Image: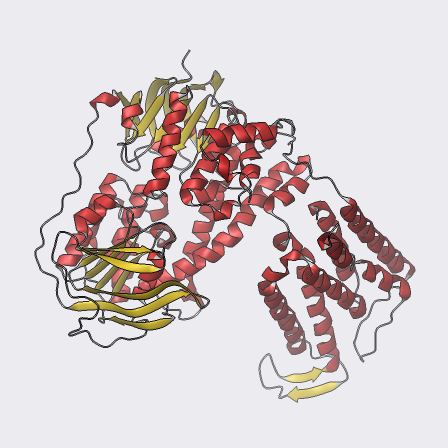
Amino acid sequence: MPLVALSELTYWYPGSDVPALRDVSLALDGGLTVVAGPSGGGKSTLLRVLNGLVPHFHGGRISGLAEVDGCDVRRTPTRRLARSVGFVFQDPELQTVYTVVDREVAFGLENLAVPGSEIPGRVEEALGQAGILHLAGRRVATLSGGERQRVALASALALRPRMIVLDEPTSQLDPDGAARLLEATRRLAADGCAVVVAEHRLDHLIPAATTLLEVRDGSPEQTDPRTWRAPSRALRVGRTTSPGPLAWSLDRVDAGFQGRPVLADVALSGSSGEVVALTGPDGSGKTTLLRVIAGTLAPLTGRVERRPGRIAYLPQNPTSLLHRPTVLDEVMLTLGRAGDRGEAVEILEMLGLLRAADRYPRDLATGERQRVALAAVLVGTPSLVLLDEPTRGMDAFARSALQGLVERLRDRGAAVVLATHDAELTDALADRVVSVKNGGALPLGPHLSANPSPASGGGGLPRERGGKDLL
Amino acid sequence: MNARGVAAWSAACLFVALSTTNPVYRAAVLAATLAALLASPGRARARPIFTFVLVTAALGTLLNLVVSHIGTTVLFELPDGIPGLGGPYTAEALAFGVSTGVTLAAAVLAVAPFSLQLGPEEILDALPSALSRTGSALAASLNLVPALGTSLEAVTEAQRLRGWRPRGPRSWAAVAVPVVLTAIEGSIQLAESMEARGYGSGPRSHLRPRHLGPRDWLLVAASTAAVGMFAASLLTGSAADWYPFPTLAPPEVSALPLAACLLLFAPVPLCRWSRSPS
C-alpha cells in the first residue's frame, strides 16, 4: 500500500462554493516528489491534506478518500498524523515557538511525550540530518532565515516521520540559505525518507525528483520529472529611453540606528530612467540604504538629495499593507492620495487581476496577494521607485509582471533602486549594480548599459536636502 | 527563576494590591514590584514598561481628579459652565486618584516579569498538562506582541510613502487594520505549525524538566505566607480599608499586613543570591 493514497478527494474551504481541490486521485511513496504550479492552484491545500491540517485545522467540507501511512486523514487529527508526517512551512519566523535551537527542535518530541532521557539524542540526530549540528544552543533570534528554516526542518525530522512535507520552504530565503536547505532536502530523499516539496524554482530539485506533480485549478497532474524543461530566463528588454537627469544622490552619508552607523561614507546617485540594483548579503544594510534614499531614515551625517515627486516604496512584506475591502480599492487608494490620474484597470489587467478586482485582497492566494501589492504601490507615475527584495516569495507570473512594471516605470522616467539577491532580476533590469557589504556601498560599474552620472556629478538636481520627507 | 515561582509571587502581589483600598499597602506592593524588577536581569528591557506604568498611573490619577468633584478640601474650582470640567477639584479626589494609580502600576509591574525575565518556553513548561491547549493560544499571543511592534513600524513607513498622513483617529485605520490583520495571520500560522508538531496530543514530556530549586521554593513560601498573612489581616480587620471622602484622613497601618507586604520583596535578595558566585 502506498504511503499516500488519495481517491476522488474534493475539498472546499469554509464559506467557499468553489473547491480548492477537485476530484484528486493519486498515490505517493518514497523518494522526492516536487509539487509545482501557479499561485492559487491548490499546492498548499494539497500539502495540508497530507498531515490533516486540511480539514482539521482549516475546517471546510471534504469528500472522497485520503489515507496517509495507513491513517484515514478525515478521522485522524493532525497531532496524531504528526508522528508520520513532518511539515515545514513557508515563513521561518512564523513557525518558531522557543527561543533556543535545541529546545525548538525538542518541541515536537515533548508534545508526543517522548521520555526526557531520549530527547537529547533525538535532537542531536535531527540537527545532524539538517546539517546544523553547530547551531545547537544558539538563540533562534540570532540565526539567518536559511538557518531558521533548517531548524524548522530539524524540528520536523526529530519526530522521525515517514514523510517530510515542505511548503515553498525557500521563498523567504536568500540564495545561499535556499541552496543549503534544498541540499539538505535532497540528502534526506537520497537517504530513503519520503519528501514532498512545493516550490516555484525547480532547477535545483528536478534532477533529484522521482515524481513531479503540477497542480492547477485544484487538480494535480502527475508527470515524469525528466520531461520538465527549465523556463527560459527573463530577457532584458531594450529601452525606449536613455537615463535622464540626476534624480537622487547621497553624498558622504553615514546611516544607522541610535547613533550607530550601519553604513559609512556612502556616495551614490541615480538618474531618472535608470535602474540601480543594490546587492549584498542579508543584514548588510540594503534596506537601510533604501530608507535613506526614501527619506524615512535621516542620515547620521552627510547629504541626501532627491528630485521632487512621488516615491513608490515596496517593502519586504508588501502584502502586509493590504487593508481595503477590494483589490480595486487598494489601487484607487494610492492613486487618490497621489492625485495621480493613473490607470487602475490597466495595471490590474497587466497583472492578471482584473477578475479579482472586486475580491477582498487577503482572501487571495499568496502569489495573487503579491501582485495586488505590486499594483497598489507601483500604479501611476512615481518619480522614484524603491523596491526591497521585490521577488522574494514570488511565483513566475508575479516575477514577470514585476519586471514589466519596472520597465514601464523606468521608460516613463522613474529612477528605480532595487535591493535584491535575485541575480536573474538584476541581469534583466539593472543598469548599474552596487555591492552593499561591510558597512559600505561599492559601485560595481555599469551593468550592460552605460553608466550615468556619478554622485559627484551634479547638474540640475533641485535642492531637497538632509533626507527630509518630500511627500 | 522557575515560572511557577514567579507566578506565585505575581499572584501574591495582585492579591494584596487588589484586595485592599489602603494606599499604604498598595504603595508597599508597588515598591516591592519595582525593587524586584530593578534587581532582576530583565531590568535593562524594563524602560518601556516603566513609561507605560507611569502614564497609566498618571492618567488614572488625573481622571479621578477631573471626574470626581466630591470632598471637602477644595484645591481650586472651575466655573460650573464648563461642560465636563467645571466644579470643585478636591484633595480627597486627588488622593483617591493617586491610590488608584498606584494600584494600576502595582498590578502591571506584578506581571511584568513574565515578559521580561521568562522565555515563552519557561511559561509553557510551567503550565499544568490540563492547560496544554491553552498554552498553544498563549504562545501564539506571546508571538503577537513583538510582531505587532515590528509590523507597526514597517506599515506606518510604507503607508506614509503611499501618501497616508495621520489626520485624526479614523485615519489610523490605514495603519492599525493591516498591522492587526498581519499579526493575526502570523499567529494563526504559528498555531498551525504547533499543531503540525503534535501540540495538544496529551501530557507532555520535557527536554530539561524544570523542577523548583531552593530559591524558587523560598519565593513560593514567601508569597504563600504573604497571602496568608494579608488574608488573615483582612478577616480580623487589622488591614483596615481607607476611604478619603468626605474629608481626607491618613490611612491606618498595622504591623501584620505591613509584614505581609515586606515578604513581597523576597525576589530582591533571591535575585542577588542567584548572581553571587557559588
Residue A30 placement (x, y as % from top left): 39, 18
The front one of B145 and A457 is A457
How many numbered callouts?
0
Asked if one can make out residue B15 in the rendered structure from this viewpoint, the answer is no
Q: How is the image coloured?
A: secondary structure
Residue A115 placement (x, y as % from top left): 65, 27
Locate residue B90 relative to residue A20 in the image: left or right.
Answer: right
- Residue A80 sits above or below residue B240 on the image: above
The front one of B61 and A311 is A311
The front one of B257 and A112 is A112
The front one of B26 and B146 is B146
- At x 67%, y 56%, the residue is B111
- Residue B213 sits above or below residue A125 on the image: below
Residue A409 placement (x, y as % from top left): 17, 57
Residue A235 placement (x, y as % from top left): 14, 43
Locate residue A251 relative to residue B80 in the image: left or right.
Answer: left
- Residue B278 sits above or below residue A247 on the image: above
Asked if one can make out residue B56 in the rendered structure from this viewpoint, the answer is yes
Locate residue A249 relative to residue A52 in the image: left or right.
Answer: left
